[in-house]
Image (cartoon, rainbow, N blue to C red):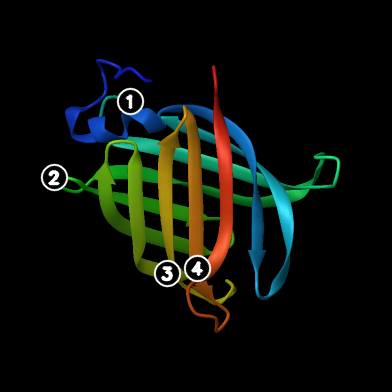
Amino acid sequence: MFTIDPTLHPDIAPLAWLVGRWEGAGVVGYPTMESANFGQEVFVTHDGRPFLTWLSQTWLLDEQGEKTEPYATETGYWRAAGEGEVELLLAHPTGIVEMYYGSVEPARVELKTDGVIRSSGAADYSAAQRMYGYVNSNLMWVMDMAAEGHPMTSHMSAELKRVE
């Protein structure tokens, strides 16, 4: 399964399975866009304080699975928010900052936005929900969002493998 680094702060021990480098692929789509395949690389690190650092980079893929163009980048922090609760704070270079709040249980996290801040030039985006799971040693995740006048709708999902 996974081992807990002894320097990992005990408050974030329920998120220990996220720590590492992950790579994989997924699907993105929305009513305002055509579905496409994407590649993703995620780095989750810690320095002994009670949070994890998150960096995710994605790029679109062609039919052969080759990178065609950068897609999305997000950086942020996972924080314990009490017994069985967690926060995820994310910033995007597109002018969006998100605050997620949710529950954590062994190998599963469910989150909903508690707040979304957009710059004047950012896309119309109002809410999202995400689920992350540690399944068969892989990081699997899904994201639904409400944007551009659409209600909460499936947007992205991926399966990532740990890279040693």
Q: Which amino acid does label 1 sit on?
A: Asp
Q: Which amino acid does label 4 sit on?
A: Met
Assess whether mark 3 and mark 1 are in contact (beta carbons under 8 angstroms).
no
Image coordinates for residue 129, horizontal then vertical, percent? 41, 62
Which numbered mark, 2 or 1, is in the foreground of this view? 2
Image check: 8 left or right of 63? left
Mark 2 Cα-neighbour bin, 10 Å: few <14, some 14–19, many ≥20: few
Question: Element under label 1?
Answer: loop
Which numbered mark, 3 or 4, is in the foreground of this view? 4
Residue 41 or residue 109, whichever sits in front: 109
Q: What residue sits 47% from the left and 27% below the top? A: 137
Mark 3 Cα-neighbour bin, 10 Å: few <14, some 14–19, many ≥20: some
Residue topped by disc 4: 145
Q: Which amino acid does label 2 sit on?
A: Glu
Q: What residue sits 34% from the left and 53% below the top? A: 110
Mark 4 Cα-neighbour bin, 10 Å: few <14, some 14–19, many ≥20: many
For the question of whether residue 24 can be seen, the reply is: yes
Residue topped by disc 2: 83
Labels 1 and 4: the sequence-earlier one: 1
Measured in 3D between alpha carbons, the distance from the residue under mark 3 to the one under mark 2, in whole angstroms, is 27 Å
Image coordinates for residue 15, horizontal then vertical, percent? 31, 35
Mark 1 Cα-neighbour bin, 10 Å: few <14, some 14–19, many ≥20: few
Labels 2 and 1: the sequence-earlier one: 1
Q: In which quarter of the image is the C terminus?
A: top right
Q: Which mark is residue 47?
A: 1
Image coordinates for residue 58, horizontal then vertical, percent? 65, 45
Residue topped by disc 3: 117
Residue 137 in the image: above or below residue 75:
above
Which numbered mark, 3 or 2, is in the foreground of this view? 2
